[in-house]
Amino acid sequence: MVLLLTSLAPGKASAHAELDHAEPRVGNKVASPPREVTLWFTQKLEGAFSSISVTGPSGQRVDAGKARVSGNQMSIPLKSGGAGTYHVNWHVLSVDTHTTDGSFTFQVGP
């Protein structure tokens, strides 16, 4: 009976903007360095307080310029960094004033 009541209770809404998906995809391998990284979140973002940084295989930053935010999407252009592992770090402020951050990698190469 308790299990039935628990399953009927309304779901608890998330109060934070979490990463929904990314392009290149988290942990994915792509053939050539992408021109940009785009992230989609579960809530709309405040552009002035949200950022992305990307480092290439040499450990040098390859992001070029400021992140662009539109609704729940954030993108940043990249300089070419060659083959290897890329590290993406993000920090966002959602419109409900909660901050979240995270990171992931993707691979470039044959």
Image (spheres, rainbow, N blue to C red):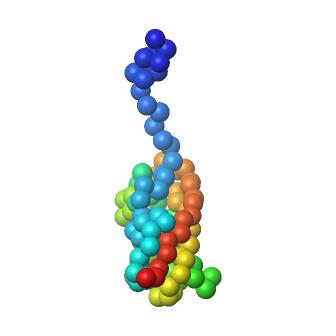
Residue 54, by quadrant, is bottom right
Instruction: Answer whether residue 60 is visible to the viewer in this image.
Output: no
Q: Residue at x 43, y 31 (%)?
A: 11
Image: 53 above or below 26:
below
Q: Residue at x 42, y 55 (%)?
A: 20
Residue at image position (56%, 68%) is: 89
Residue 70 location (% of width, % of height):
37, 64
**Residue 39 falls in which quadrant of the image?**
bottom left
Nearest to the observer: residue 88 or residue 45: 88
Q: Quadrant of residue 9 in the image?
A: top left
What is the x, y in percent for residue 43?
42, 51
Number of marks: 0
Residue 108, position in %: x, y? 47, 79
Name, please, the residue furthest toward the left: 70
Dividing the image into 4 quarters, which one contains the C terminus?
bottom left
Query: 2 and 51: which one is in front?
Result: 2
Task: Give the residue drawn at x 44%, y 16%.
Answer: 5
Q: Is residue 100 left or right of residue 34?
A: right
Q: Which residue is nearer to you in this view: 12 or 27?
A: 27
Instruction: Give the residue furthest to the top.
Output: 1
Report whether residue 102 is seen. Answer: yes
Q: Is 51 above or below relative to 19?
A: below
Q: Residue furthest right?
A: 59
- List the single residue furthest toward the front: 110
Q: Is residue 54 above or below residue 42?
A: below
Q: Position of residue 52 (x, y in %)?
A: 52, 70
